[in-house]
């Protein structure tokens, strides 16, 4: 559900018609959204959609050309330092201070906030205890990523910003980091994250905004986003040897026939009726539909529907 | 303050753990000093002189003794032919020839007669003008002294060698402060490279996402440079004094002051480089472009007097000219290129201008 009617002051993050251009490129083009306390909010979109720029303006790293951003009730431009001390930021950054050890780096970052971080706890939570005395340059990609998340938590922040936190990780490492992010939420932190992974957005985000070309195309929960445009399911099968389009369109309950790369998708409100008709049609031709599969629409379909192209590209 | 300290310690740890950086900043100037020290103090400037005595008399023996005792020469006895061969093959730098009949002339003079004077010949190689000149002076001086002694006159005028300030600065004394100045220059302008690296790797951006004020970041970088500058200064001066016997004459307070001012000025120039270089490669290139003219046109390796006048006027714009000049003046009493307050003013001027430029153009991301 959209946060209609909720007072803006309640939102932990409130972004209002924010714009930012780099030269001729309008990187962020009128973005508005709000994040409530304790939510995981995702910005989903392809590379170059403006997700990172939007997030970095909220973090106070870039000034927007126009629009208003409030974090924890404070204006980002006027109270940047006060905000920075209460939020945690993870950037898509390579190794910081490669010659320092994991523990040294965590304590250094703690000192920036004028506090002693809960180093033991962070090392444990992010499974870095074994690597505590290793120089950060010797860490693997997954360990580096976990370290950069640990650094975002040194000040026990109320709001955590995660920029593509699992990019480049193998599936096991990704699952591990998801667990860490869920734990952050259970500790009552508010999380704003960007991702270009559909599964990640579906698995983690309470609500998300789909971005492309600097604009938010739609936002809401995953169910909202899918249910709003797809009441139907898709019947997929191999395109090679498929019956003609006019015959497929005439099948029971089929609303649309879509040809994808090597698949045909029949959108239907009544899966058994459509499949019955399809089998009858192919049976007459003494063939059968290859790789037959029924799918609920996914965020991928939502993105395709919104932009006319697949997110993977 | 506590944040400044924490960041400075972290930066110093990073620096000392990076072996390559450590070598280039600390070992390199040391190697340089030792190398130049050995080249310019090597052998103590003794000249090899072939000694050809065709007279074999008490007088020629006395003359030989005088040469062996007083002059910075090493004598190699031999016949005229032998000595000529030695000089041609480079074993001796010159030949002193005492002709037959020397004793006879002296005996005659002492007996009250007026014989024609005999010439003692000094043979030198005009292609090696410094050596030739030195040998001629040595020979002339010693022969004149012998003349006086033999004619029984007591000398009324003597030359007492002494040095006032120092055009006579020996080479090592000239080089040690110069190399210190060069090391400080490199330390400062090479500050640009980690800065650009940190910006490229988004480290500056990451730090900017914390409440850490920027002055702490800049302050820490400058402190690190000053600590390294102190270590470099101690090393270079230590070697200069202990191994090369350079005498440090000046007020330590002035020396420290100019070392700090120099480190600050060149670090600020490093920030200017980092303001305009977008990539690490660009920073490397720009650093070289700045470094080499500074190195060769600032009186570091040779005094400015030897430069043609148009290059000399280029040198008068170089900040390193003034740091080198100030350090030579304060450390070893070098001849001023300009008075110390002018050195100070020029360096401070460069500092202010470059600070203003980096404040205007430096980008954190």
Image (cartoon, rainbow, N blue to C red):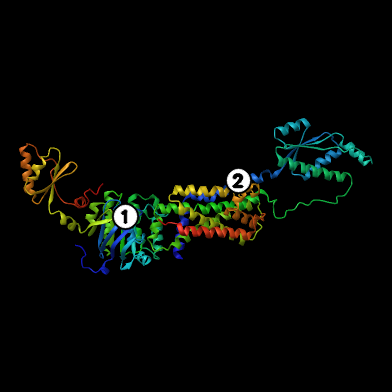
Residue A124 seen? no
B317 and A15: which is toward the camera: B317
The quadrant holding residue B48 is: top right
- Kindly state the secondary structure of the residue where label 1 is placed: strand
- The structure residue drawn at horizontal position 36% and vertical position 67%, both measured from the top left corner, is A79
Say which residue label 1 marks.
A27
User: x%, y% of residue B248?
Assistant: 65, 56
User: x%, y% of residue B124?
Assistant: 75, 37
Q: Which chain is mark 1 on? A: A
Whether residue A37 sits left or right of residue B61 in the image: it is left
Q: Residues within 10 Å of mark 1 (few under 14, many from 20)?
A: many
- Kindly state the secondary structure of the residue where label 2 is placed: helix
- How many labels sit on residues? 2
Residue B318 seen? yes
Q: Which chain is mark 2 on? A: B
A234 and A120: which is toward the camera: A234
User: x%, y% of residue B46?
Assistant: 71, 43
Position of residue A277 relative to residue A76, above or below, is above
A298 and A6: which is toward the camera: A6
For the N terminus of chain A, the image quarter is bottom left
Say which residue label 2 marks.
B35
Farthest residue to the front: give it: A24
Q: Residues within 10 Å of mark 2 (few under 14, many from 20)?
A: few
Whether residue B123 sits left or right of residue B343 in the image: it is right
B25 and A19: which is toward the camera: A19
User: x%, y% of residue B285?
Assistant: 48, 47
Farthest residue to the right: give it: B112
Inter-mark Cα distance, 1 to 2: 57 Å
Whether residue A238 sits left or right of residue A99 in the image: it is left
Position of residue B355 relative to residue B82, above or below, is below
Single out the mark in the foreground, 1 or 2.
Answer: 1
- The structure residue drawn at horizontal position 24% and vertical position 69%, both measured from the top left corner, is A7
């Amino acid at each position: 559900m959209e946060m209609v009617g909720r007072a803006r002051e309640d939102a932990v993050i409130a972004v209002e018609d924010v714009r930012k251009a780099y030269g001729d490129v309008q990187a962020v083009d009128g973005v508005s959204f709000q994040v409530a306390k304790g939510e995981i909010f995702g910005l989903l979109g392809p590379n170059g959609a403006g997700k990172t720029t939007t997030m970095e303006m909220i973090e106070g790293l870039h000034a927007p050309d126009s629009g208003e951003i409030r974090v924890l009730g404070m204006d980002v431009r006027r109270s940047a330092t006060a905000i920075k001390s209460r939020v945690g930021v993870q950037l898509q950054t390579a190794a910081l201070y490669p010659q320092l050890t994991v523990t040294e780096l965590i304590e250094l970052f703690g000192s920036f906030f004028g506090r002693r971080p809960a180093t033991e706890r962070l090392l444990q939570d992010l499974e870095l205890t074994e690597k505590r005395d290793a120089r950060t340059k010797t860490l693997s990609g997954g360990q580096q990523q976990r370290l950069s998340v640990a650094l975002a938590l040194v000040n026990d922040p109320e709001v955590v910003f995660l920029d593509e936190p699992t990019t480049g990780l193998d599936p096991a490492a990704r699952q591990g980091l998801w667990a860490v992010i869920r734990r952050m939420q259970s500790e009552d932190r508010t999380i704003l994250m960007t991702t270009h992974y559909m599964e990640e957005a579906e698995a983690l985000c309470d609500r998300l905004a789909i971005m492309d070309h600097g604009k938010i195309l739609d936002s809401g929960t995953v169910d909202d986003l899918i249910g709003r445009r797809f009441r139907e399911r898709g019947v997929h099968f191999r395109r090679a040897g498929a019956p003609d389009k006019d015959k497929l369109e005439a099948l029971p309950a089929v609303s649309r026939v879509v040809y994808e790369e090597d698949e045909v998708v029949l959108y239907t409100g009544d899966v058994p009726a459509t499949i019955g008709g399809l089998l009858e049609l192919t049976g007459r031709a003494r063939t059968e539909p290859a790789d037959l599969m029924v799918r609920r629409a996914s965020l991928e379909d939502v993105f395709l529907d919104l932009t006319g192209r697949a997110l993977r590209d | 303050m506590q944040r400044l300290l924490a960041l400075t310690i972290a930066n110093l740890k990073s620096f000392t753990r990076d072996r390559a950086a450590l070598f280039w900043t600390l070992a390199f100037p040391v190697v340089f000093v030792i190398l130049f020290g050995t080249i310019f103090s090597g052998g103590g400037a003794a000249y090899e002189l072939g000694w050809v005595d065709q007279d074999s008399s008490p007088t020629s023996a006395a003359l030989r003794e005088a040469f062996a005792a007083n002059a910075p020469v090493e004598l190699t006895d031999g016949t005229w032919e032998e000595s000529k061969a030695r000089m041609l093959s480079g074993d001796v730098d010159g030949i002193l020839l005492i002709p037959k009949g020397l004793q006879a002339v002296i005996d005659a003079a002492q007996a009250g007669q007026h014989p024609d004077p005999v010439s003692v010949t000094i043979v030198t190689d005009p292609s090696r003008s410094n050596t030739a000149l030195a040998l001629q002076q040595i020979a002339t001086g010693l022969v004149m002294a012998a003349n006086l002694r033999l004619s029984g006159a007591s000398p009324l005028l003597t030359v007492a060698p002494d040095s006032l300030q120092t055009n006579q600065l020996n080479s090592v004394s000239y080089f040690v402060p110069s190399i210190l100045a060069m090391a400080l220059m490199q330390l400062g302008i090479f500050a640009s490279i980690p800065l650009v690296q940190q910006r490229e790797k988004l480290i500056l951006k990451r730090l900017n996402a914390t409440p850490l004020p920027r002055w702490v970041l800049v302050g820490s970088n400058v402190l690190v440079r000053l600590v390294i500058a102190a270590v470099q200064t101690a090393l270079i001066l230590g070697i200069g004094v202990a191994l090369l016997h350079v005498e440090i004459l000046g007020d330590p307070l002035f020396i420290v002051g100019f070392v700090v001012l120099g480190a600050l000025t060149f670090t600020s120039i490093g920030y200017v480089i980092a303001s305009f270089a977008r990539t690490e490669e660009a920073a490397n290139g720009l650093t070289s472009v700045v470094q080499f003219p500074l190195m060769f046109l600032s009186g570091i390796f040779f005094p400015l007097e030897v430069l043609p006048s148009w290059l000399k006027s280029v040198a008068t714009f170089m900040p390193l000219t003034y740091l080198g000049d100030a350090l030579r003046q304060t450390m070893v009493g070098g001849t001023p290129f300009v008075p110390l307050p002018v050195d100070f003013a020029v360096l401070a001027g460069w500092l202010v201008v470059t600070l203003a430029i980096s404040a205007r153009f430096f980008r954190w991301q």
